[in-house]
Amino acid sequence: MELTARLPFRLRSGVRETTDFDLNPEMRPKNRPLKPAAVLIPLMAAEGSWDVILTRRSAELADHPGQIAFPGGKVDAGDGTALNAALREAREEIGLPSALVHVIGDLPRHETVTGYSVTPYVGVVTSGFVPRAEAGEVDEVFRVPIHHLIRAENFSIQSRIWMGTKRSYYTVPFGPYYIWGATARMLRNLCDSMDPVHD
């Protein structure tokens, strides 16, 4: 059976674009230029289910050290498309060959507080892939069961003081991993985009 045919959902349209300011709309800058970026949301078959592959960024990085993220980054001039950027970053960050990824769709763009317009691509990864974390940029590659991420009760809204103002954000913790911010918001949009498939 084709791997994608085993997915328990389809991606549906009509889900809105998201931002890091969804819970704090008054803090959203107006008319600022956004830099294009892209991430890959890799899905990999697990025993009787599916997992999402995530990374923990290196604690030595200047930007977002130790945070949980999808493989991805800014769109470089040589990439040509946002999808190419997402696949390139996945190759570099977790050693995922593009030939092992079957892209099944994309989600609406997400605007980050740092000024990026991120296009998330959802891709099914062929079985047999063994992650390899990029030294100096990725401390760990791990998997989260998708059934954990499709349950609204596993998401919560928390807050902290940012630039002197209280800022609220989504979180979806899993075991020792504190998944929050843009990654949690895009995961919530992924879950909102899922139409269950019934046999």
Image: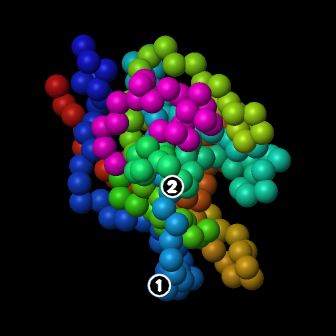
Point 75% across, 33% down: residue:
135
Dot 2 falls on a residue whose secondary structure is: loop
**Marker disc for residue 77:** 2
- CA–CA distance in space, label 1 to label 2: 23 Å
108 left or right, relative to 20: left
Q: Relative to 23, does residue 104 appear above or below in the rendering?
A: above
Residue 129 lies, in percent from the top left, at 51, 19
Point 53% across, 53% down: residue:
76
Point 61% across, 68% down: residue:
114
The quadrant where residue 176 appears? top right
Q: Relative to 38, does residue 126 appear above or below in the rendering?
A: above
- In this rendered view, identify the residue nearer to me: 87 or 54: 87
Residue 90 lies, in percent from the top left, at 54, 37
Q: Is 90 included in the stretch rendered in magenta?
A: yes
**Marker disc for residue 41:** none
Please identify the residue farthest to the front as the structure is shown. Answer: 78
Residue 1 lies, in percent from the top left, at 24, 13
Q: Name the residue under label 1.
A: 31
Asked whether residue 18 is in view, the answer is yes
* First along the sequence among labels 1 and 2: 1
Q: Is 64 included in the stretch rendered in magenta?
A: no
Q: What residue type is labelled 2?
A: Ala
Dot 1 falls on a residue whose secondary structure is: loop
Point 21% across, 34% down: residue:
197
- In this rendered view, identify the residue nearer to me: 27 or 123: 123
**Magenta stretch in the rendered image:** 87-106
The quadrant where residue 157 appears? bottom right
Q: Which amino acid does label 1 sit on?
A: Asn
Residue 17 lies, in percent from the top left, at 37, 65
Q: Relative to 23, does residue 198 appear above or below in the rendering?
A: above
